[in-house]
Image (cartoon, helix red, strand yellow):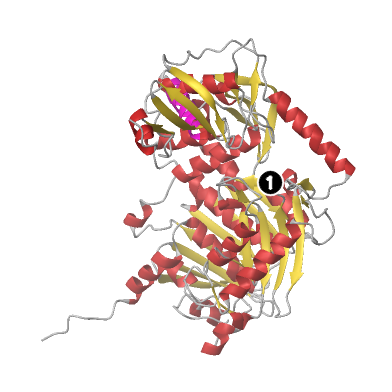
């Protein structure tokens, strides 16, 4: 009887391995760039066509490979970086598994050209589907050039899962950005369809590299961090002040011993450091490098090497959290103790403050009080405040209806909940959730009626993006237009915003548009915008909302309740949270043992 279990063919085994290592063109670029860095390259040039689906080409000026090594490089688990199991816990290279090149070759048409510094001629191999078809000697520059064409040409099922050219290139540019941030001493160039999209020359300082890749406006709000523990851990890099935040964790660049990782321990430590300093569902910007002895971290957790495991997880967590928190609180002496990176913190009663702080607080309170009190004779119109402002009200005639018969506003509880009488019932209304539902329904109604009403800006807002965000903008310009934004390319990675939804007039334009880019990036061109439209409108509506802990005048409360009563589904916010709690007369009387 023949056995049912059999050993897989080498080519099939490579294709299975490729499923873990090669997810998309960006995965190819990551593996090839890491190999080039390990080879000592100081210049890296990446060329891509059709988002990398047609071509990915990486050229470096590293040490190169001789003929024998070139053939071995396409064999599985063949590597020059480790020789024994002990080496796994003493790694000083980015790669070590020996899987990348054979995995890539098994699902593409690959051409590998290389020449070491001590030889006059180089060698070139051509492989198709993992099988070497041609090998020849030729004259070439020192270093290595890898061309990967027609990715997944022999696995059409995998090819169907790739997204549009713009989406794939956005992921590819993100990979290049991560590696470029880690190595300011390397010159990197990225071209797509013959056009240069990224040129990062060698920099002496991390701040210069961050400004070149993520934008100078962003870099201006970053704070340097440099902390070392008595156990050998060192944390260096840049963190954003609390005012610099994003709607997703896309701008958290964390590295362990020079390797970009998505580690839950480190991310949680960073978020804990910012706790109480950021709004809910907002994420900081950070480029942080954690260096520790190699034996204290295991990078052999996943083939992509994006995950690591620390030997003393809690200690690493506390070290990172403490270092970031101390810098934010100005423990290094660059900011007052009652501020975060120079931005004043709220002080509790009895806290000693300087006369200047007291005067500043008085001015801020006066301004806030002025902004929250419209003329008594004119009903208020809701309008979102600008960056760092509370809600303000325009002195224009309100288009909202009156309170329903039998409704009466009693007051406000904790500056967050409205107390109202509706007939014989008592209502407790969450003002933020209520206004969120109102804004959501207005936006959805305008979109269904032919388009969201726009408000032109007096002066266009120029928004500087990173490469991934720029790719999202370029891909979704028509979707932005449907949602009431007028965006146009402004050169390089910048876009000009000339109009935004009228309902959101006064909101911070840059934050609003960048948040929308994050939302559209998650949807992707492969999905219909209509299928995820409610999610997008929810994000938009959040930018024009009354917040909790915000005092309201009686006309403002009446307007909010009148608008809430006029819409359907007013009992819950778009995220599903309850808007109000109704208590009937019988329930209240029963509680007090009456009736």
Image label count: 1
Q: Position of residue 313 (x, y in %)?
A: 57, 74
Q: Residue at x 36, y 56 (%)?
A: 158
The part of the chain drawn in magenta is 433-447
Q: Residue at x 49, y 49 (%)?
A: 168
Asked if residue 313 lies left or right of residue 479, the reply is right
Asked if residue 73 lies left or right of residue 212, the reply is left
Q: Position of residue 5 (x, y in %)?
A: 21, 81
Q: Residues within 10 Å of mark 1 (few under 14, many from 20)?
A: some
Q: Quadrant of residue 181?
A: bottom right
Q: Quadrant of residue 427?
A: top left
- In the rendered image, the residue lying farthest to the right is 355
- Choose between 258 and 310: the one closer to the eye: 310
Q: Position of residue 559 (x, y in %)?
A: 53, 19
Q: Residue at x 63, y 38 (%)?
A: 511
Asked if residue 236 lies left or right of residue 418, the reply is right
- Choose between 348 and 545: the one closer to the eye: 348
Asked if residue 53 lies left or right of residue 459, the reply is left
Q: Is residue 419 magenta?
A: no
Quarter of the picture containing the N terminus is: bottom left
Examine the residues drawn in magenta and state their main secondary structure. helix
**What residue would you read off at disc 1?**
244
- Choose between 74 and 355: the one closer to the eye: 355
- In the rendered image, the residue lying farthest to the front is 594
At mark 1, the secondary structure is loop
Quarter of the picture containing the C terminus is: top left
Q: Quadrant of residue 394?
A: top right
Q: Residue at x 42, y 62 (%)?
A: 108
Q: Position of residue 480 (x, y in %)?
A: 52, 31
């Amino acid at each position: 009887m023949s056995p049912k279990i059999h050993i897989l063919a080498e080519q099939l085994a490579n294709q299975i391995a490729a499923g873990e290592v090669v997810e998309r063109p960006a995965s190819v670029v990551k593996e090839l760039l890491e190999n080039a860095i390990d080879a000592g390259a100081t210049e890296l040039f990446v060329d891509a066509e059709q988002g990398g689906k047609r071509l990915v080409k990486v050229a470096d000026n590293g040490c190169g490979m001789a003929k024998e090594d070139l053939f071995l490089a396409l064999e599985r688990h063949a590597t020059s970086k480790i020789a024994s199991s002990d080496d796994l816990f003493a790694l000083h290279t980015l790669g070590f598994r020996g899987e990348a090149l054979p995995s890539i070759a098994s699902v593409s048409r690959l051409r590998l050209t290389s020449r070491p510094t001590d030889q006059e001629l180089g060698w070139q191999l051509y492989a198709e589907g993992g099988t070497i078809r041609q090998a020849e000697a030729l004259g070439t520059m020192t270093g290595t050039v890898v061309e990967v064409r027609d990715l997944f040409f022999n696995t059409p099922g995998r090819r169907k899962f790739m997204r549009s050219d713009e989406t794939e290139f956005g992921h590819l540019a993100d990979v290049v950005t991560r590696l470029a941030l880690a190595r300011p001493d390397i010159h990197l160039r990225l071209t797509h369809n013959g056009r240069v999209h990224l040129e990062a020359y060698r920099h002496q300082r991390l701040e210069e590299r961050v400004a070149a890749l993520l934008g100078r406006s962003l870099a201006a709000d970053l704070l340097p961090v440099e902390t070392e523990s008595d156990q050998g851990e060192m944390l260096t890099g840049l963190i954003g002040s609390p005012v610099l935040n994003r709607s997703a964790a896309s701008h958290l660049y964390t590295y362990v011993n020079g390797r970009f990782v998505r580690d839950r321990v480190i991310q949680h430590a960073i978020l804990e450091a910012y706790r109480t300093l950021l709004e809910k569902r907002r994420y900081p910007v950070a480029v942080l490098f954690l260096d520790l002895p190699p034996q204290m971290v295991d990078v052999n957790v996943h083939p992509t090497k994006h995950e690591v495991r620390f030997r003393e997880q809690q200690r690493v967590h506390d070290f990172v959290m403490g270092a970031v928190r101390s810098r934010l609180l100005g423990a290094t002496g660059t900011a007052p103790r009652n501020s975060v990176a120079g931005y004043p913190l709220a002080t509790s009663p009895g806290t000693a403050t300087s006369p200047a702080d007291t005067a500043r607080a008085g001015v801020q309170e006066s301004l806030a009080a002025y902004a929250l009190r419209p003329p008594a004779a004119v009903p208020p119109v809701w309008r979102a405040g600008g960056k760092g402002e509370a809600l303000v009200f325009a002195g224009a005639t309100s288009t909202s209806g009156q309170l329903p018969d039998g409704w009466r506003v009693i007051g406000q509880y904790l500056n967050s909940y409205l107390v109202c009488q509706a007939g014989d019932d008592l209502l407790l209304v969450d003002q933020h959730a209520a206004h969120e539902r109102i804004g959501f329904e207005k936006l959805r109604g305008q979109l269904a009626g032919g388009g969201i009403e726009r408000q032109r800006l007096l002066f266009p807002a120029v928004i500087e993006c990173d490469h991934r965000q720029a790719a999202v903008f370029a891909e979704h310009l028509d979707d932005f237009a449907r949602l009431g934004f007028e965006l146009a390319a402004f050169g390089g990675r910048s876009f000009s915003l000339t109009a935004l939804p009228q309902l959101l007039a006064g909101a911070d334009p840059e934050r609003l548009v960048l948040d929308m880019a994050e939302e559209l990036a998650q949807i992707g061109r492969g999905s219909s915008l209509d299928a995820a439209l409610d999610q997008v409108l929810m994000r938009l509506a959040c930018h024009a909302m009354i917040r909790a802990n915000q005092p309201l005048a009686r006309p403002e409360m009446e307007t909010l309740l009148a608008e809430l009563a006029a819409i359907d589904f007013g009992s819950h916010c778009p995220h599903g949270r309850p808007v109000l709690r109704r208590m009937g007369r019988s329930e209240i009387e029963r509680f007090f043992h009456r009736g």
